[in-house]
Amino acid sequence: GLVFYSQEFKQYSIPFMGSDVSVVKRSQRYLHSQLQETPVQYGAYVTVGGLGSVMKLMFAGILFLLLVKFSFGRKLLTKYPEFFSAGRFTKKGPTQKQMDGTSFTMTFFGEGYSEGQDPQSGKPNVKICTQVKGPEPGYVATPIAMVQAAVALLEDSAHLPKEGGVYSPGAAFSKTKLIDRLSRRGVEFSVISQPEV
C-alpha cells in the first residue's frame, strides 16, 4: 500500500514522490548493459512519523488536490503559500538562519548476496545500511553538488562514459571521484553497518 510501518525507523512511511526511482533505474540499466554490473532493486520512501502525522498528511493532500483542480484554488495557493504550507514555503524563500538550521539525511538499506554466493541458492545473506548527510538541500547542498559535478567533468574525463549523449548522474559519475569531492565539502557518504544476516 501507500502507507506502511518502517521497522527500521519505527515510523510510518510513504513512497517518495520525486524522480529518484526512475533516475536510479536508468543508471542501473546503463551500468548493467554497458559495464556488466549487477543491477539492484530500488525504492524511495519518506518517513512521516506516527498515525497522527499520517492523518495530517492525508488531510493536507486531499485539500491540496481539491484546491489545484480549480483556478480559484490555484490562485489561493499561489497568493498564500505560507498559510497553506504551515509556514514551510514563503514567497521570500528561507532566511539565512533557517538555512543554517536545516540539513538532510538519507538512509539506505540494502540486502544482497556475499561475493561468490549464487542468488539462486537461497535468500540474501548480507545486509548494509548507508547514509548521505549534508547541509540545507536546496540552496546549499545543490550548488555544492553542481560545482563538484562540473569539476568531475573536467578532471575525471578519462572515467566518464566514452560515447556522447544524455546520462543519468549514476551512469555519468559512477567511476569518477565525485563522492570523495562531495564528502570533502560537507555532503558526506558513509557505511553505517554491514552485518552478515
Image (tube, grey):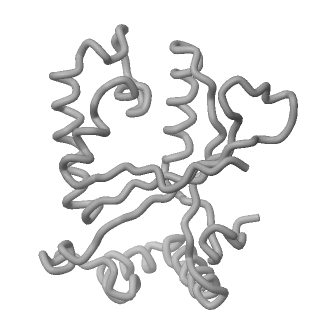
As displayed, is residue 137 above or below residue 63?
above
Which residue is at the front of the view, 24 or 88? Answer: 24
Q: Is residue 11 visible?
A: yes
Q: Is residue 15 above or below residue 172?
A: below
Q: x and y percent of residue 162 in the render? A: 35, 9
Give percent across and percent down for residue 79.
29, 81
Q: In this view, which residue lies farthest toward the front?
A: 196
Farthest residue in the top direction? 163
Task: Determine whether, in the image, residue 121 is placed left or right of residue 100.
Answer: right
Across and down, in percent, residue 41 comes to 66, 40
Q: Please tell me which residue is depicted at 57% across the width and 81% down the height of the picture.
A: 49
Depth check, front residue: 125 or 152: 125
Quadrant where the image shows the N terminus: bottom right
Question: At 70% from the left edge and 23% from the top edge, which residue is drawn?
Answer: 116
Q: Quadrant of residue 155?
A: top left
Q: Residue furthest right?
A: 121
Q: Which residue is at 56% across, 71% downward? A: 47
Q: Which residue is rendered at x = 48% and y = 56% of the image?
A: 192
Give residue 78's position: percent from left, percent from top: 33, 75
Q: Quadrant of residue 96?
A: bottom left
Q: Nearer the viewer, residue 122 or 134?
A: 122
User: Is residue 107 found left or right of 142 in the rendered image?
Assistant: right
- Please state if 50 lies on the left or on the right of 189 as rendered: right
Q: Is residue 90 above or below residue 116?
A: below
Extreme left residue here? 96
